Amino acid sequence: MKILLVEDERDLNRIIVKQLTSLSYNVDACFDGMEAMDLVEENDYDIAILDIMLPKADGYKILQHIRKANKDMPVLFLTAKDAVEDRVKGLDMGANDYLIKPFAFDELAARIRALTRTSFHSDANVLKVGDLTLDLSARQVQRAENDINLSAKEFDLLEYLMRNSGIILSREKIENYIWSYDYEGGTNLIDVYISYLRKKIDEGYEEKMIQTVRGVGYVLRAKV
């Protein structure tokens, strides 16, 4: 799961990124509203966590930019603005949740889980494509009820492919989603990780679910 975090207090930004990364989230973090809007244009996120009082463009402007771009990702305001009118304004403008600083990280994590469950129309945090199952909470993968051990990046890549089953994903799109926006590696890394996944997901099975679309990218499909 990929998160956009916009927080101009650098120490707090660093702490939140560290905590979210420890939960295996992929986080793009920035410190001002203009950079945030650029990132929204260039990347797909599962949720945005926004401060309101930000340099260059405030959280309200970022939210408007997200909605004008027809992106329906959940948006959570994380802010010290605690007046009732501030909360009402944020929610009326299209935010999905509002959490006041100071906050407990466990509560932030719970709100992220709740918002992303809603956006993915999933109550159990389990993805299923054909005989392939991925449990997000337990971080377990099975195919035909056989356990499959994946590294953190392999798990993230498989989750992304399964959430977009039947949709062809370019190498660039996969790279931008799985790795941070400032990653400077080559697209060969994507091919390497796809190869790792194929050995674990498809090897030994008649149906090959991870398919290459030559000149375009990759897609995960199941016949049933």
Image (tube, rainbow, N blue to C red):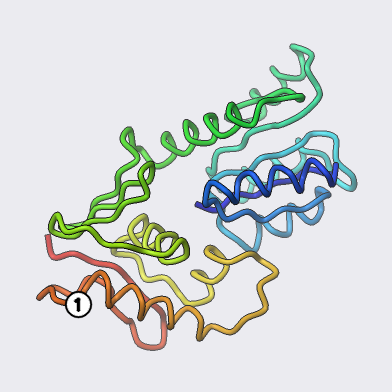
Quadrant where the C terminus lies?
bottom left
Residue type, mark 1 in image: Glu
Image vertical order of residue 149 relative to residue 202, above or below: above
Q: What residue is drawn where x is 54% and y is 51%? A: 25
Residue 219 position within the rendered picture, expressed as x and y whole percent measured from the top left: 32, 71
Circle 1: element type: loop
Name which quarter of the figure residue 64 lies in: top right
Position of residue 134 in the picture relative to residue 25 (left or right): left
Position of residue 75 in the picture relative to residue 190 (left or right): right
Q: Which residue lies furthest to the right in this view?
A: 55
Position of residue 214 in the picture relative to residue 112 (left or right): left
Position of residue 12 in the picture relative to residue 144 (left or right): right
Q: What residue is drawn where x is 44% and y is 39%? A: 119
Residue 85 position within the rendered picture, expressed as x and y whole percent measured from the top left: 76, 14
Q: What residue is drawn where x is 76% and y is 48%? A: 14
Of residues 24 and 213, the one nearer the viewer is 24
Residue 147 position within the rendered picture, expressed as x and y whole percent measured from the top left: 22, 58
Q: How crowded is mark 1: few (under 14 residues within 10 Å), some or many (20 or more)?
A: few
Image vertical order of residue 22 relative to residue 88, above or below: below
Of residues 58 and 79, the one nearer the viewer is 79
Q: What residue is drawn where x is 30% and y is 44%? A: 126
Of residues 221 and 153, the one nearer the viewer is 153
Q: Name the residue under label 1.
A: 203
How many labels, in total? 1
Image vertical order of residue 24 relative to residue 124, above or below: below
Residue 198 position within the rendered picture, expressed as x and y whole percent measured from the top left: 29, 76
